[in-house]
Image (cartoon, rainbow, N blue to C red):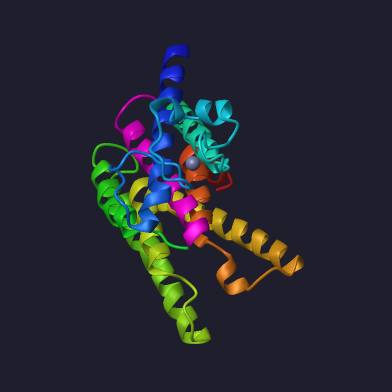
């Protein structure tokens, strides 16, 4: 087991480095494959040894080698998070189609979480293909195509209804279409049960953070909360622990 864990952690760190590129470039409309990584401050192209996950950040002490601008600690954090999600996913699923599906799903959730908290957008280039890919994977593994299809319809449908009701009552947009597509994607990959668990977890987290912000009297509440980030955290927790949570819940019936 030690070797697969090392391999998956190394893979997670390398993929996490690519997710950093996606998180930075997707919301700016830049290509994620070209050009090579640059210092975001002086725009100098990075050498290979400045691009090693976590290690380069530590060796460079969090500063660009030439312009000495601070490098955000979010970069190594995303790499470590991705490695942790990869290792936990392997432990949860074992090797198979489900591992591939859940790793792709985990990557998408990490990118959406950070993009939404920084820019308040959930790129269509992730959510729309995500719905299709999640549904296709459901034919070769859990949750099965029917649960996936119900997950897409119920996930997208419930938020669409909520968005419509909110606009009717408050005469302003409270939920974006990005959230609708994202929950449909979560339903596609995880099935309707874990999609519901995700929605519950995200609502609880959103309420707690919202209450904390009100208590601290910070900013304009309406724009303060990135629902996509809470959905992503809820979806990762559901993906990694959800079957156990649902088994526990069902044990009361
Ligand atoms: Zn620089």
Q: Which residue is drawn at 29% across and 37% down?
A: 141
Height in image: 52 above or below 82?
Answer: above
Name the foreground residue: 148 vs 180: 180
Q: Nearer the viewer, residue 141 or 21?
A: 21
Seen in the image, is 81 located left or right of residue 12? Answer: right
Location of residue 33 (image quadrant): top left
Of the pair 67 and 195, the residue shown nearer to us: 67
Is residue 160 located in the magenta-colored stretch of the structure? no
Which residue in the rendered view is the most extreme toward the front?
A: 66
For the question of whether residue 154 can be seen, the reply is no
Q: Which residue lies furthest to the right in this view?
A: 215
Q: Compared to 59, does 44 lie above or below?
A: below
> What percent of the width, then of the height, locates residue 98?
34, 34
**Residue 166 % position (x, y):** 49, 79
Where residue 195 sits: x, y (%)?
44, 53
Give the magenta part as a residue range: 93-119
The N terminus is located in which quarter?
top left
Residue 169 location, x and y as percent? 51, 85
Instruction: Please identify the residue farthest to the top as the structure is shown.
Output: 2
Q: What's the residue at 26%, 47% (across, down)?
A: 133
């Amino acid at each position: 087991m030690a070797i697969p864990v090392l391999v998956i952690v190394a893979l997670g760190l390398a993929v996490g480095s690519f997710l950093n590129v996606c998180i930075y470039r997707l919301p700016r409309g830049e290509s994620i494959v070209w050009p090579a990584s640059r210092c975001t401050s002086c725009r100098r192209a990075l050498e290979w040894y400045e691009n090693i996950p976590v290690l380069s950040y530590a060796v460079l002490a969090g500063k660009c080698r030439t312009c000495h601008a601070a490098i955000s600690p979010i970069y190594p954090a995303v790499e470590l998070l991705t490695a942790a999600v990869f290792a936990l996913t392997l432990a949860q699923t074992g090797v198979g189609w489900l591992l591939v599906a859940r790793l792709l799903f985990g990557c998408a959730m990490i990118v959406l979480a950070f993009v939404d908290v920084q820019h308040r957008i959930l790129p269509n280039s992730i959510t729309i293909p995500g719905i299709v890919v999640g549904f296709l994977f459901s034919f070769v593994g859990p949750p099965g195509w029917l649960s996936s299809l119900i997950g897409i319809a119920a996930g997208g449908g419930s938020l669409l209804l909520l968005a419509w009701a909110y606009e009717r009552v408050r005469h302003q947009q409270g939920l974006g279409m990005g959230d609708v597509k994202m929950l449909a994607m979560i339903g596609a990959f995880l099935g309707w049960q874990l999609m519901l668990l995700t929605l519950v977890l995200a609502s609880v987290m959103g309420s707690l953070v919202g209450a904390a912000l009100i208590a601290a009297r910070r900013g304009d509440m309406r724009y303060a909360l990135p629902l996509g980030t809470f959905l992503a955290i809820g979806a990762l927790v559901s993906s990694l622990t959800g079957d156990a949570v649902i088994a526990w819940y069902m044990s009361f019936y």
